[in-house]
């Protein structure tokens, strides 16, 4: 009997010992996994960043944190927590005293998992955008605005098939393109912000199937509206402020802009064609437009009855034009309208009961 009890006790102790060993092994595995969630950066990528830094001019010492073994802790650098690969380099300048300059080293190509690159608001003193920036297969966000690049935009950027956001708004150094054909390669592009002169932009082959936001403001087009813009059925926001656009409006199918929410053509020279544009946009089947700004376009005449077809319109700016005559009766159908600007000193507003009021701005 005693022997049986002894055997049972030993068996119990053995099972307890085995249980605690299993718990210890599990804890070890969990700690290993947790440690892997915060891996340091990959050595080849750390060296690539250091070589990139070496080619830059950094008078303010903004990149002084770029020392040590773990580049994932460096200012402007983010890594994937699981793999340790560098996925983001954000060197957007914070002001005049922190602007970077110099050269963009090709060592960046060793950042093969890079998805985000922002070099905006720096001062690269007119050097061209490097061709190799078109080789980042995973890049989704690229902002080179006001970074003072110059010269020809490399068509190699058209290889960035995963790119969703592209901002090339220029600075004091002129940038140019020979054509826009390469834009068709940006099949994932959602937002395009552009401040570059197109010498032959009026009839390019451009197939942007996913873009929803385009900003071409402050360009020196000095010609009519680019017809290719009206082929982008996904377009929601279109900004052409001060882009020296002239009439006449091209013969295009405005119904393609069925998803357009914001159209800002203010401070151009469309002239009397502005009324035709309003008429054309009103034919869009769902009338999704919420904000229309045609201020400062030197067009005159009466407002068309088609204005009342913009059921979702919230803001209408026709200031600094030569609008004459009575308001069309159809304007009462704009029940969502919150702001109507017909001159620099006169605004028309409505409340939910369609109680129209004129309110003169106070003189300053």
Image: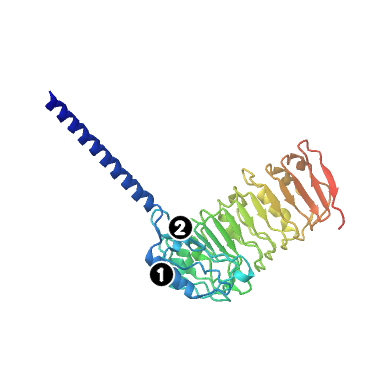
Q: Is residue 260 left or right of residue 63?
A: right
Quick check: can you spot residue 197? Answer: no
Residues 199 and 134: in front is 134
Q: Quadrant of the C terminus?
A: bottom right
134 in relation to 352, above or below: below
Q: Count the marks: how many?
A: 2
Residue 182: image location, x then y, percent: 49, 65
Who comes first in sequence, dot 2 or dot 1?
Answer: 1
In the picture, the disc for residue 47 is 1
- At x 26% / y 42%, what residue is drawn? 21
From the image, state whether disc 2 or disc 1 is nearer to you: 1
Q: Quadrant of the N terminus?
A: top left
- The residue lying furthest to the right in this view is 363
In the picture, the disc for residue 263 is none
161 in relation to 66, above or below: above
Give the colour scheme shown.
rainbow
Task: Specify few, some or many for label 2: CA neighbours under 10 Å numbering under 14, 14-19, or 20 or more.
Answer: some
Residue 196: image location, x then y, percent: 60, 68
> SS for tag 2?
loop
250 in relation to 22, above or below: below
- At x 66% / y 60%, what residue is drawn? 240
Alpha-carbon span between mark 2 and mark 1: 26 Å
Residue that numbered label 2 is attached to: 162
């Amino acid at each position: 009997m005693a022997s049986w009890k002894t055997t049972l006790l030993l068996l119990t102790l053995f099972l307890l010992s085995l249980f605690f060993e299993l718990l210890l092994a599990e804890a070890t595995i969990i700690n290993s996994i947790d440690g892997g969630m915060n891996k340091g950066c990959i050595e080849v990528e750390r060296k690539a960043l250091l070589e990139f830094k070496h080619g830059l001019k950094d008078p303010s010492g903004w990149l002084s944190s770029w020392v040590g073994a773990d580049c994932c802790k460096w200012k402007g650098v983010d890594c994937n927590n699981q793999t340790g690969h560098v996925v983001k380099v954000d060197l957007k300048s914070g002001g005049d005293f922190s602007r970077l300059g110099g050269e963009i080293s090709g060592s960046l190509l060793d950042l093969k998992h890079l998805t985000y690159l922002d070099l905006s608001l720096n001062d690269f003193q007119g050097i061209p955008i490097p061709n190799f920036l078109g080789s980042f297969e995973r890049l989704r966000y690229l902002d080179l605005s006001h970074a003072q690049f110059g010269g020809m935009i490399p068509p190699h950027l058209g290889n960035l098939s995963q790119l969703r956001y592209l901002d090339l708004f220029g600075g004091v150094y002129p940038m140019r393109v020979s054509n826009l054909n390469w834009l068709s390669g940006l099949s994932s592009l959602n937002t395009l912000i552009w401040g570059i002169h197109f010498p032959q932009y009026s009839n390019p082959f451009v197939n942007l199937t996913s873009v929803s936001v385009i900003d071409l403001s402050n360009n020196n087009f000095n010609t009519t509206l680019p017809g290719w813009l009206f082929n982008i059925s996904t377009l929601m926001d279109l900004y052409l402020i001060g882009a020296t656009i002239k009439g006449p409006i091209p013969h295009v199918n405005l119904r393609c802009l069925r998803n357009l929410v914001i159209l800002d053509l203010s401070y151009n020279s469309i002239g009397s064609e502005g009324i035709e544009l309003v008429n054309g946009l009103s034919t869009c089947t769902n009338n999704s437009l919420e904000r229309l700004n045609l201020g400062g376009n030197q067009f005159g005449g009466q407002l068309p009855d088609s204005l009342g077809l913009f059921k979702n319109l919230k803001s209408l700016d026709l200031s600094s034009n030569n609008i004459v005559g009575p308001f069309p009766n159809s304007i009462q159908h704009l029940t969502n309208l919150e702001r109507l600007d017909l001159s620099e000193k006169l605004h028309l507003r409505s409340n939910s009961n369609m109680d129209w009021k004129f309110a003169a701005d106070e003189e300053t």
